[in-house]
Structure formats: structure tokens, C-alpha cells
Amino acid sequence: MGESRQELLAWLNGLLQLNITKVEQCGTGAAYCQIYDSIFLDIPMSRVKFNANSEYQYLENFKILSNCFRKHHVDRPLTVEQLTKCKMQDNLEFLQWTKRYWDQYYPGGDYDALARRKGTGPGAAPNAAPPAATPTSARTSTSANTGARRPGPAGVAAGTAPRTASRQTGAGGPASTALQQKNAELMETVQGLERERDFYFSKLRDIELLIQQAMENDPALEEEEGGLLKQIQTILYSTEVSSQEGFEIPVDAETEAERDFEKEGAGEEETF
């Protein structure tokens, strides 16, 4: 029988230095990512969103976790759709399994969760109580000690974070630092949206090529207006024109140039 919820939360908060109060809050994926980072030490923690507050951000976290599972051959399917609903039972079962995996493969030694998160706030999850504030001096001391214990990537982050913070504060104060952090978060969001766009575009392109190939092999399919392939093709090529939604039929450069030329010609005729 697995650990109880209270035992799991105590272990989780102790390991990751978080303040998670409910198992459901693990459904954002952030805590799971860092648990496995404590085992493998190669998860890009700077990309993990501990302040995630939307399903899209939850999915981004689970993508990072999925990459980790593939890389290290973790033999456990990720039921992302169920976990991201932040239901207690699904997350409890996965957290219990994760704890057993951690007990078996954790390399031992100290794991400085704050240094791996580069000193960012825990942002436990929706409805979580805010964590107790950690004094800057204590955080700096912890980071320095970590650098002495573990000279890997965590040590580098720990050694450079305080100097970077001091430069930013001297240059523009806390407001400048907050703006830079917000800008970095927005850039990450944009990059994530671009990856999502490319991902779904490639799927649509594959569907389009399959339909075209089928119609080339059987030209009669193209004549069937009510056929399934024809209907899918219609959906693929349909474009909604609406100023409110922001969709507009794309106009290539040559067509636009021709329209401009016709407008200029009409203007000259009226002048003469």
C-alpha cells in the first residue's frame, strides 16, 4: 500500500522546498518535473512553469516531463489529460508511483531545489497557500553551499544568481528586474505558441498530402462533393473572414501588386 496523502506531501515539500497543500496541485506538472530532476539532474528547470495557471502551461510542463521519460526510458505512461484536470485520485496514484520510483533511483546526497529553480518562487499551484518568504541572505548562503557540494549545473546557477541580481538592481532597481523577468516569461510563452503552431501545421499538412495522394490514385473521389475526403479538404481550405476574429484570406504579393496597379490605372483615367 502506498503512502498517504499527508506523507507524500511532507516528502514532496521537503524535497522541493515547496508549500503544496493538496495532491491535486501536482496536476500543473511542475512538481513532477522537479522530482525527476532530483533523480536525473538534466531537466531544463528554467522552462518549467511553477506559476502555471492555465491548461496550456500545464501541458508545456508535461511535455518537458514526457521528454525526460523518453530519454531515460521511464516505463510509465503519462495520462496527461487526466492529470491536468487536477483531480485528487489520478494525481495521488501517479505521485505514489513516482515516490516508489524515486526511492529506487534517487542517487543520494543533497538536492538544492531552489538552486535548480534558479531562486524562482515555488508558485505551488492553484489554490495553494503562499510559501513562507525566504530571506535573500539565506537564499544566497544556500546557493553558495550548494556550489561547494555539487560542482555541476546547479553549482553554476547558484554562483551566478546573486551577482546577476545585484547588477540588475544597481542598473534599474526592482522595477527593472521585474520587467526583465516578465519579458523573459513572455518570450517563453511566444516560443511555446510558435512550437504549438508548427506542430499543428505539420499535422494539417500531412492530412492534406494524404488526401491529395488518395485523389490522385482515384480521380473519382474528387468528383464526389459529398464524399468524406472532399469534405475534409473543404475544411482544410476554408478561411473565415471576420474583422472581429482577426482571420483574413491571405493575399500573395503578386495579387496585391496587381490590385494596386489597377487602382493606379483607374485614377489616371479619371484624371484625363
Image: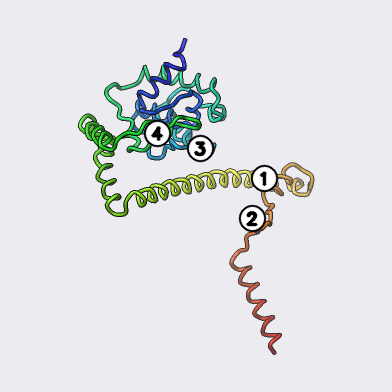
Residue lying at 63% horizontally and 76% vertically, measured from the top left = 261
Report which residue position mark 1 lands on.
211
Q: Type of residue at label 3?
A: Asn
Report which residue position mark 2 lands on.
247
Query: Total label count?
Result: 4
* Labelled disc at residue 122: 4
Q: Work out whether residue 6 or residue 2 is closer to the camera in this orientation and state it.
A: 6
Q: Earlier in the sequence, mark 2 or mark 4?
A: 4
Q: Position of residue 107 (x, y in %)?
A: 30, 22
Image depth: mark 3 or mark 1 in front? 3
Cα separation between marks 4 and 1:
48 Å
Q: Type of residue at label 1?
A: Ile
Relative placement, left or right, of 53 versus 267 is: left
Image depth: mark 2 or mark 1 in front? 2
Q: Work out whether residue 202 or residue 221 is closer to the camera in this orientation and state it.
A: 202
Q: Position of residue 17 (x, y in %)?
A: 35, 28
Mark 2 and mark 4 residues within 8 Å of each other at the beta carbon: no
Q: Secondary structure at mark 3?
A: loop
* Labelled disc at residue 53: 3
Q: Earlier in the sequence, mark 4 or mark 1?
A: 4
Q: Secondary structure at mark 4?
A: loop
Dot 4: few (<14), some (14–19), or many (≥20) neighbours within 10 Å? many
